[in-house]
Image: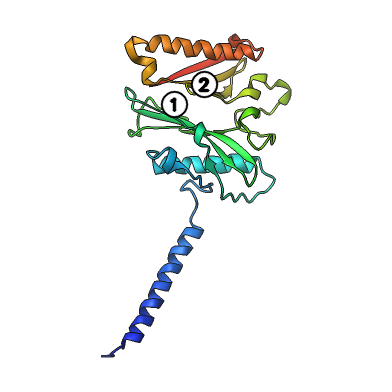
Amino acid sequence: MIQLNKKQILIIISIGLLFIALFIALYFFTRPVSKYGNGINISGYDKYIPNLPADRRDSIDTALYKITKNNSNNSNVSIKDAIIRGDSVTYNYDKPTNVNSGSFIVDMQSIKQSYLITYEWSSDVNNASLSGYSVAAACLPANKLIYGDFSCKDDFSSPTNNSSRDPILDYLPYTTFNYVVTATTNTPNKVELDANIILYSSDTIDGNRDSSINKYESEITDWIKSKGLNPNNYLINYSISG
């Protein structure tokens, strides 16, 4: 039996640790950022949305990669500074339906781009109350772009025929503390809008839930009118969280 001295043992241990370190480094440098494929790591989840499941984070990272690539001249999108804009975060848990939903803005100073992320999830993966749009990445209105306009295009605001482009798409997505309005698909005659109204405890106390919903629906139609547009020209799908 070969007897090893302390120096030889330390050398063997050091070599073993080196191989382990190399394996770990190789794993982290070669694995996809997201389990759904390419993604952009976003900083701030633990600070602003600590309960967001890892699966939903992966979905968001991938959605951000796809929209960033579509708005980049570089086919190799490698972003290291994507960060959640703290004052943009909204979150709501609707107890009756067991649906969590929210939104936030992601800023990337290195490429001077920002996007709106909306998401929803439930502890019940088969929850029938989920809308089917678990994650969406969208362009922002000009007044939310801290780095300036970059001619953003997304799935909601880039129809193939620009001559028939509805002017409301220039103002979407529209976000406030109590609702998020986005465009979904174009029907043959009208643009279809999704309006997610977020109710908080102050909106539902003393039996005020219905009146609060009516108030926010009225605010949304008034906002459409403020842009010189007719709310009757749009199919508005209202969903209530909270």
Q: Quadrant of residue 96?
A: top left
Q: Dot 1: what SS?
A: loop
Q: Quadrant of the C terminus?
A: top left
Left-right relation of 52 to 157: left
Residue 118 visible to the viewer: no
Residue hosting label 1: 131
* Depth check, front residue: 202 or 61: 202
Q: Position of residue 190 (x, y in %)?
A: 61, 15
Q: Position of residue 207 (x, y in %)?
A: 33, 10
Q: Position of residue 101 (x, y in %)?
A: 42, 29
Q: Which mark is residue 241?
A: none
Left-right relation of 207 to 170: left
Find out whether the residues at labels 2 and 1 contact each other: C-beta distance under 8 Å: yes
**Residue 30, relative to residue 236: is it above or below?**
below
Residue hosting label 2: 194
Question: Which residue of the protein is positioned furthest toward the right in this rendering?
Answer: 163
